Amino acid sequence: MAALRAAKQALRKEVKRRVATVTDDEKRRQSLVVSQKLFSHPKYMSSQRIAVFLSMKDELNTQEIIKDMFKCGKSCFIPRYESTSSHMDMLKVNSLQDIETLPLTSWNIRQPAKEDNSREEALASGGLDLILMPGLGFDRARNRLGRGKGFYDNYLERCKKHPKGKPYTIALAFKEQLCEKVPVDNHDVPIDEVLYEDEK
């Protein structure tokens, strides 16, 4: 167990180092390429209720995806993380303006305030069709290296208990986040697909 933790920590460092060398322009370019791939993906096109992360600087930018979701009339849910635990809810947002009014967390991400009880939580209602997943690293066997808090693994476990079942999961990645092999154990939930810019 300790060896696995150490291996994950080492890989997190390595991937962070790789992503830190990518220029902002290149991140923007790859983000647009991956967003376009997603827009023509059959799962995205057929999904109505979608959870999406608000990106940090070292993650693929999801701004265009969120814009497209509102334009297409899809229901958009974003994470509210509890910093003291590994609990996360997916709460509904109504527009880009709505997102811009949300408070900033210590990670510099906007999310609904803890005392905001007015929003629909995805699992308290119709569940989710699709979750767009962040992560630090991914491999071709669809294993994901998170930041070590377990937010998404725990949320997917909760999804399995919902009548709708586990939603389809697509990770969005820079090609610099691809790894030879991500070390995993039985608690790590593999994702259905990783979208990134293919090498041509």
Image (cartoon, rainbow, N blue to C red):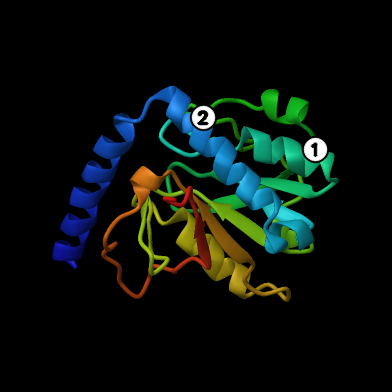
x, y percentage for residue 103? 61, 25
Q: Residues within 10 Å of mark 1 (few under 14, many from 20)?
A: few
137 versus 116 height, above or below: below
| Whether residue 88 can be seen here | yes
Q: Residues within 10 Å of mark 2 (few under 14, many from 20)?
A: few
Among all residues in the image, which is located at the extreme left?
3
How many numbered discs? 2
Quadrant hosting residue 185: bottom left
User: Tag 2, which secondary structure?
Assistant: helix
Residue at image location 66% in from the left, 35% down from the top: 64
74 versus 158 height, above or below: above
Circle number at residue 94: 1
- The residue at which mark 2 appears reads as 28
x, y percentage for residue 180? 26, 60
* Residues at circles 1 and 2 in contact by the CB criterion of under 8 Å: no
39 versus 124 height, above or below: above
